[in-house]
């Protein structure tokens, strides 16, 4: 999803170290990791719901097609 290379990560950590300071850096990183995890959980939940909706739509389409086939067969028999 997000592609960060090692050089970019080092630059980000150095900037964070300068801005936040060495004492608060672990605390800030833990907070950032929690935010990232909750963000990813929300994205995964949204993906799951979308996939379920797509499956539901596909099932409904399949049921409609089967129903039409049954009706067509019934009409042919008459």
Image (cartoon, rainbow, N blue to C red):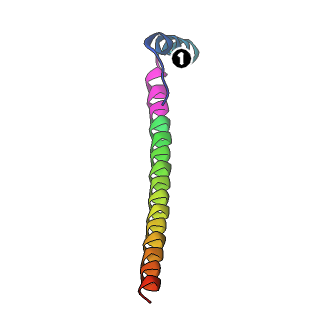
Q: Residue furthest bottom?
A: 78
Q: In the rendered view, does 2 fall on the left or right side of 77?
A: right
Residue at point 45% right, 32% down? 33
In this picture, which residue range is highlighted in magenta? 23-33
Dot 1: what SS? helix
Compared with 63, 4 (above or below) is above
Number of residue marks:
1
Q: Residues within 10 Å of mark 1 (few under 14, many from 20)?
A: some
Viewer-closest of 38 and 49: 49
Look at the picture and state if 51 lies above or below 33.
below
Q: Nearer the viewer, residue 76 or 54?
A: 76
Q: Quadrant of residue 63?
A: bottom left
Provide residue 3's location: percent of width, then percent of height. Answer: 48, 23
- From the image, give the main secondary structure of the stretch colored magenta: helix
Q: Give the answer, above or below, for where 62 lies relative to 77.
A: above
Q: Residue at x 44, y 74 (%)?
A: 69
Looking at the rendered image, the quarter that the C terminus falls into is bottom left
Where in the figure is residue 42, as x and y percent of width and height?
Answer: 49, 47
Residue 30 belongs to magenta span: yes
| Residue 62 position by quadrant | bottom left
Residue shown at the point (48%, 75%) measured from the top left = 68
Nearer to the camera, 24 or 41: 41
Position in image of residue 10 (x %, y %): 47, 11
27 falls in the magenta region: yes
**Rendering quarter of residue 18:** top right
**Residue beneath label 1, please?**
16
The image shows residue 77 at horizontal and vertical percentages of: 41, 86
């Amino acid at each position: 999803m997000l592609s960060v290379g090692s050089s970019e990560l080092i630059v980000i950590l150095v900037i964070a170290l300068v801005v936040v300071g060495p004492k608060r850096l672990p605390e800030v990183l833990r907070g950032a990791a929690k935010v990232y995890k909750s963000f990813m959980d929300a994205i995964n939940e949204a993906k799951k719901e979308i996939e379920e909706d797509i499956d539901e739509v596909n099932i409904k389409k399949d049921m409609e097609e089967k129903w039409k086939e049954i009706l067509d067969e019934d009409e042919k028999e008459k």
